[in-house]
Amino acid sequence: MTAEEEDKSDDFSRHPAARSYSVIPGPKPDREAWRRRVKGLSTFFKKYPFIIDSGVRLHAQSVNRYILNSEGTEVVTGNPYVRLSYYLYARTTDGMDLSRHQSYDAVSLDELPPDSAVLKDMEQSADELRALTKAPLVEPYTGPAIFRAKASAVYFHEIMGHRVEGHRQKLESEGQTFTKKLGQSVTADFISVYDDATLPEFKGTFLRGHYSFDDEGVPSQNVTIVKDGVLKGFLMTRSPIRNFPSSNGHARRESGSRVVARMGNTIVKASRSVPYPKLREMLIEELKRQKKPFGLVFDDISGGFTMTGRGFTQSFKVIPLLVYRVYPDGRPDEVVRGVDIVGTPLASFTKITAAADDDDVFNGTCGAESGSVPVSAIAPSLLLSEVEVEKKMTFSEKPPILPPPHHDKGGKP
């Protein structure tokens, strides 16, 4: 037997039966044409000897879900997922692996960007990776920093998203960071956070987190999580929690996994914002006020992980991929490497002091106990008065001695 739970809500809630039928046909690419295109794009990286691994991938599928229950719900709903992506890796002489990557998401193959646009991005990624291989290491540090728009979208997804999933408020094994914070301030008063899976796109950009019905047959909804800095709600399945007796359409899972509350399209909005150049000026002002020798700009973040279980510290680690050091005396920005962002959520969100007007989209895949599900996050660039970074893990392996073989020869002499 277990001790009585503090939250005595019912285990399941009723919901009106839904009926919908919308099958998405599978993509029908010209396989040979795409094979030639992907191979042609991948040869671009051959001219960079410092790249030890690289690749280009095309992924196209339609996922249709069939939902029936004893209440009369009959739902067939589907989503198309098309992604063209590339990656490139390098390794420094001190054993640190570095990477750059880019993904292009769309509802169809025809909406993917032309090769000219992809090649331009590839060149920029290669230049960034070259700069990273020569970049100095940053020691553990606390000080002001800017998260660029896409990076701040990942930041909110990782640090707040999982902690406002409904089942985590009820389970006694969870840390319940925000469970009793309803109606209280949890971040800056100009920040609001929503999760709106009803949106198929944002300013013309496809959103992977869109769906019409969740995996319990409940229509997706726009849920207010934070309004003007104050916590207002949680992401709910049909498993009630105190003050939230019904689902708001956020029950999700990967096929074969159990359903729990998950994010869809997480949207961070700022009621007050400035142009990005002004946000940089505000960073410089904050550096001078705190008498810090430099600040950091996190341009790209790959993701990370957050501890939500009660048996762990309620902390997070976010993995930056591209970081710049900014000096208050006007010296040029400098690419740096070797840091991970760490902290605790309750303290971290109170450090947000300003936002830019440059909202951008992160499309990705999120893993949790219900498997991996497609998600999106939208946010502006954010200025934080204090961010903590620690040293990144490195390995003992050195870069290869010989340059990579020509891929068009299959690695043969």
Image (cartoon, rainbow, N blue to C red):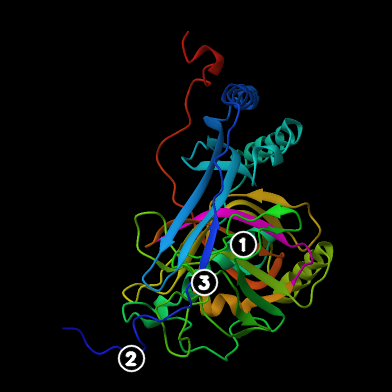
Relative to residue 276, is residue 4 depicted above or below? below
Q: Nearer the viewer, residue 286 or 413?
A: 413
> Which residue has dot 2 on it?
6
Residue 242 image position (x, y, % from top left): 43, 89
Q: CA distance from mark 2 to mark 1?
A: 32 Å
- Most distant residue in the top direction: 413
Figure quadrant of the N terminus: bottom left
Q: Nearer the viewer, residue 127 or 12?
A: 12
Q: Nearer the viewer, mark 3 or mark 2?
A: 3
Along the line of sight, which residue is nearer the eye, 267 or 273?
Answer: 267
- Is 235 part of what is drawn in magenta? no
Q: Is residue 153 left or right of residue 329?
A: left
Q: Residue at x 49, y 15 (%)?
A: 410
Where does the magenta region start and end? 355-368
Number of other residues with Cα within 10 Å of mark 2, as a class: few under 14, some 14 to 19, many 20 or more: few
Can you identify the residue that label 1 sits on? 377
